[in-house]
Amino acid sequence: MGKHNEFGRLGEQMAVDFLLKNGYEICERNFRYQKAEIDIIARKDGFLVIVEVKSRTGGFTEEISQTISKKKISLLVMAADYYIENNGINEEVRFDLIIIIQKKGGLNLEHVKNAFYFF
């Protein structure tokens, strides 16, 4: 397995640990529906939280939040809709982004709530 895949899994585990430490209940990890995958589905304070995790090593020049395409967002929404309908969920839904960047001296984690807006 490639080092980027290992780092991606480490990043997802760090995100789960962060969410648990901050009072989130983890409902699903790596939930798949058709061609979509949701990294983490969690609950907190009356919200169902759909979490996309992005992990990168240092030296990455592009703004990481800009690497999430409209197609990726559409797939996340489709998978979230399926999950909500099939589990009879009536909570508000929020789409969050957790960014993990490896830099000299360690890892930096940033949690962006309401990362994607829908009109």
Image (cartoon, rainbow, N blue to C red):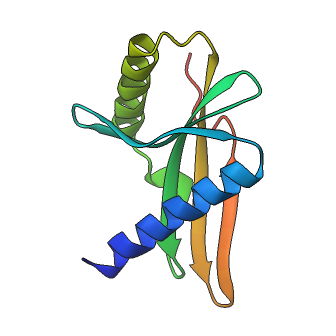
Q: Position of residue 77 (x, y in %)?
A: 42, 26
Residue 118 vs residue 49, the one in the foreground:
49
Residue located 68% across and 50% down the image: 19
Q: Is residue 52 above or below residue 58?
A: above
For the residue pair 84 and 64, the one nearer the viewer reads as 84
Who is closer to the viewer here, 35 or 13? Answer: 13
* Residue 63 seen in the figure: no
Write the residue at 44% across / 54% down: 67
The residue at the point 36 percent across, 19 percent down is 82
Question: Is residue 8 visible to the viewer in this orientation of the structure?
Answer: yes
Quadrant showing the C terminus:
top right
Quarter of the image with the N terminus in it: bottom left
Q: Where is residue 98 shown, x and y percent of the image?
A: 60, 53
Question: Would you place residue 8 above or below residue 107 in this image?
Answer: above
52 on left or right of 105: left
Compared to 19, does 42 lie above or below? above
Q: Residue furthest bottom?
A: 104
User: Residue 108: horizontal and vertical position, in percent?
Assistant: 68, 71
Q: State how many labels appear.
A: 0
What is the x, y in percent for residue 96? 61, 40
The residue lying at 38 percent from left, 14 percent from top is: 86
Left or right position of 34 against 95: left
Name the foreground residue: 99 vs 117: 99
